[in-house]
């Protein structure tokens, strides 16, 4: 009986953990939903509009963009695609007349690049696979393409739904569920006097898990304050040091892509900022070895307000971040008075709890975080009104509880390392002083 209960408990834990992994407490309803709308039947299949809606508040898909894959239920082929393309054609040797666009049982589809001919475009296509976060740019959070499928069913009863959906955005991290038939999508005419509907509709939901995307964090946080000269740096090897070791010789020449010193000659050589096809990073050698560092500085204290400075620094020579997002969780974000040089949007994942906000760059001003180097940083200041019932500089209250960059949670410093007020030294310092005085007293008594 005990063995049976142990097995049952283990199964419950496995199921609970697998569900919780893809749950983001700051964006509980965030996901990417794929919708297939069959618009018309063809002699051997159907024409469908595939729409990708990014409902994540602060996580976008950056260049080189998304890759959508699936497995056909039978022996379907793709006759043509508008607004996207399959990465491989596959073996189409059995076709004597027209050759399909893709004959693979497991096709992979990518977006087209901007500037393709108009006869290859469709609404919400051709952005190179870049999809904005819904909270930052709702209009840019949608991608779409039209696909003509052959050797498939030609009625609602004979169509077999694709399965085993995968989404790269652009790397690992997304897990997609099975396709589910839902009520058909309704379309309104331009004058809103007539509505039509899709012949059949199914959806697929994909959720993001940071642990699947990367073994280590991709960003870290450092702290400082006006009331303490101590600067709390990012934790050592916060983003993993093993994969980014430097092999620079005594002559200063690097023989690997591990990391390079900021003052190295290699940092100035042409082509150092050229991305690799495999997405390999080239980082500046630091103690933390993170591509991104977020620094929070408690800058000024006024009678009714206080001010914090936020600086984001890029240490990756091969990556710039377009339409970056920064999310902070802090209890005083419910009383933001002004944000300088960043856009700000409160996030209310739980209705009346207003302690989370999203910062992002101003369009054509600082919405592009450049590669590592002299221009690889953006910064802003936040002015917040004090709440007499909660405000304090003690016990690290002025520092954020969580920081996310581009949807990934950053590594925070340990709580006992936060800058403290001069009149509230850490407990271990007081304990050490008491112990030293006790030892001195014993020595005096023995003398």
Image: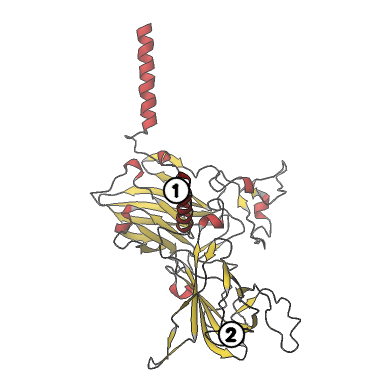
Count the numbered circles shown.
2
Q: Is residue 344 left or right of residue 52?
A: left
Q: Is residue 55 visible?
A: yes
Q: Nearer the viewer, residue 281 or 373?
A: 281
Q: Residue at x 56, y 67 (%)?
A: 167
Residue 107 lies left or right of residue 32; in this view the side is right
Spatial CA span between label 2 and label 1 = 47 Å
Question: In the rendered image, which residue does mark 2 sit on?
Answer: 153
User: What is the residue that sits farthest to the front in this orientation?
Assistant: 1
User: Where in the figure is residue 424, as x and y percent of width and height?
Assistant: 33, 35
SS class of the residue under badge 1? helix
Disc number for residue 372: none
Are the residues at dot 2 and dot 1 in contact (C-beta closer than 8 Å)?
A: no
Q: Nearer the viewer, residue 51 or 411?
A: 51
Q: Among all residues in the image, which is located at the extreme top? A: 447
Res. 421 image quadrant: top left
Q: Tell me the residue at 58%/65% (across/down).
A: 170
Task: Give residue 346's position: percent from left, percent from top.
Answer: 35, 63
Residue positioned 57% across, 77% down in the render: 126
Up-down relation of residue 330 to residue 413 (above or below) = below
**Residue situated in front as seen by the camera: 425 or 144:** 144
Quarter of the picture holding the C terminus: top left
Q: Residues within 10 Å of mark 2 (few under 14, many from 20)?
A: many
Left or right: 166 as drawn, with respect to 391 = right
Q: How is the image coloured?
A: secondary structure
The disc placed on residue 5 is 1
Is residue 347 rendered to the left or right of residue 90? left
Expressed as whole percent of the image width and height from the top left, the position of residue 142 reads 49, 75
Q: Can you say whether 236 is above or below 216 in the image?
A: above
Helix, strand or loop for disc 2? loop
């Amino acid at each position: 009986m005990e063995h049976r209960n142990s097995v049952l408990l283990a199964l419950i834990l496995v199921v609970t953990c697998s569900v919780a992994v893809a749950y983001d407490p700051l964006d509980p309803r965030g996901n990417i939903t794929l919708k297939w709308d069959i618009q018309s039947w063809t002699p051997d299949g159907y024409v469908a509009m595939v729409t990708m809606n990014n409902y994540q508040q602060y996580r976008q898909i950056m260049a080189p963009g998304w890759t959508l894959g699936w497995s056909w239920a039978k022996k379907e082929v793709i006759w043509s695609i508008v607004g996207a393309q399959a990465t491989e054609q596959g073996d189409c040797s059995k076709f004597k007349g027209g050759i399909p666009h893709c004959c693979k049982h497991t096709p992979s589809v990518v977006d087209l690049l901007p500037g393709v001919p108009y006869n290859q475009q469709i609404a919400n296509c051709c952005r190179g696979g870049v999809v904005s976060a819904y909270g930052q740019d709702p209009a840019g959070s949608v991608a779409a393409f039209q696909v003509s499928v052959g050797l498939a069913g030609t009625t609602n009863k004979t169509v077999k739904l694709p399965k085993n959906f995968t989404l790269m955005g652009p790397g690992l991290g997304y897990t997609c569920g099975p396709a589910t038939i839902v009520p058909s999508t309704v379309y309104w005419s331009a004058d809103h006097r007539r509505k039509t509907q899709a012949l059949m509709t199914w959806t697929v939901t994909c959720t993001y898990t940071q642990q699947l995307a990367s073994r280590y964090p991709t960003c870290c946080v450092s702290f400082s304050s006006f009331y303490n000269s101590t600067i709390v740096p990012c934790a050592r090897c916060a983003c993993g040091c093993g994969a980014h070791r430097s092999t620079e010789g005594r002559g200063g020449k690097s023989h690997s892509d591990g990391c390079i010193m900021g003052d190295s000659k290699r940092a100035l050589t042409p082509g150092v900022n050229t991305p690799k096809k495999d997405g390999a990073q080239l980082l500046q050698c630091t103690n933390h070895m993170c591509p991104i560092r977020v620094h929070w500085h408690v800058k000024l204290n006024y009678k009714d307000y206080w001010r914090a400075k936020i600086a984001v620094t890029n240490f990756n020579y091969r990556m710039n971040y377009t339409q970056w997002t920064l999310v902070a969780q802090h209890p005083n974000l419910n009383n933001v008075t002004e944000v300088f040089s960043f856009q700000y949007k409160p996030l209310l994942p739980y209705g009346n709890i207003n302690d989370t906000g999203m910062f992002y760059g101003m369009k054509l001003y600082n919405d592009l975080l450049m590669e590592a180097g002299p221009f690889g940083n953006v910064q802003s200041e936040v002015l917040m009104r004090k709440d007499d019932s909660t405000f304090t500089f003690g016990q690290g209250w002025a520092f954020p509880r969580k920081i996310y960059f581009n949807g990934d949670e950053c590594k925070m410093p340990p709580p006992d390392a936060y800058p403290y007020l001069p009149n509230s030294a850490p407990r271990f310092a007081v304990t050490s002083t008491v112990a030293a005085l006790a030892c001195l007293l014993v020595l005096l008594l023995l003398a």
